[in-house]
Image (tube, grey):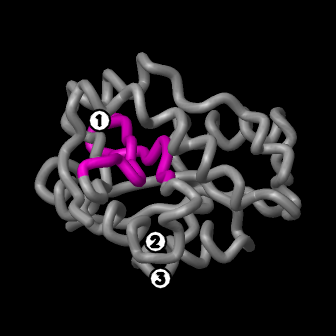
Amino acid sequence: MAIRPAEHADIRELAAIELSASELFRGTVMEFAMDDPPLDRATLERALLCSTLWVAEHEGECAGFLCATPLERLLYIDELAVASEYQGHGLGRALMETGIKEARGRFDRIALTTDRELAWNGPFYARLGFEEWPSPPAAITAELEEEIAHGFDAGRRCAMQLGLS
């Protein structure tokens, strides 16, 4: 397994990875999220241009990816996805560690929105050093509000951040 910056040719594989990764939600309170469409191509291409899109590669195939959006001095994680057959082997951690390493010096912090309770959500990010962010900036608050309007549980949803200084 190798983590590398994404290339334009990788983009066509990422939707399938995201859909496969969503299988993890089956049987959980977030099963409804399995019906969400994958990230749109414009978001992926913007991240590619900003050098904030990385892939985990296994034997020449994309097995996972991390996509992020720069918001001034903050890097917002749009999606971390690992194909179901590769989950549980440290790819998500390796992708996040790469994103954190690459963000240092370019950004002051990394932020994301997630479920507080699912083991591969809030607790996973907490193990990487992320903390809940009770008063995030407007763009992150708007993302949380949109997720809640879409059906996510307001009591379980949170913003998390990791300072990079």
Question: What residue do we see at 61% from left, 67% from top?
Answer: 121
Name which residue type carries label 2.
Phe
Which stretch appears magenta?
A: 60-81
Q: Quadrant of residue 142?
A: top right
Residue kind at label 3, given as amino acid type? Arg
Q: Residue 20, position in %: x, y? A: 61, 48
Q: Nearer the viewer, mark 1 or mark 2?
A: 2
| SS of the residue under disc 1 | loop
Residue under numbered circle 2: 130
**Mark 3: few, some, or many residues within 10 Å (few <14, many ≥20)?**
few
Q: Which mark is residue 72?
A: 1
Residue visible at 37% across and 41% down in the picture: 68
Q: Horizontal and vertical percent for residue 100?
A: 27, 62
Name the residue at 50% across, 71% down.
125
Q: Give the alpha-carbon distance from disc 3 to disc 1, as whole Å.
A: 26 Å
CA separation, marks 1 and 2?
A: 19 Å
Of labels 3 and 1, earlier in sequence is 1
Viewer-nearest residue: 53 or 159:
53
Is the residue 50 above or below the residue 87 in the image? above
Whole-number angstrom distance, CA of label 2 to CA of label 3: 7 Å
Q: Quadrant of the C terminus?
A: bottom left
Placement of the N terminus among the 4 image quadrants? bottom left
- The image position of residue 134, as x and y in percent, is 62, 61
Indicate the secondary structure of the residue bearing disc 3. Answer: helix
Q: Nearer the viewer, mark 3 or mark 1?
A: 3
SS type, badge 2? loop
Residue 60 is left or right of residue 134, and the answer is left
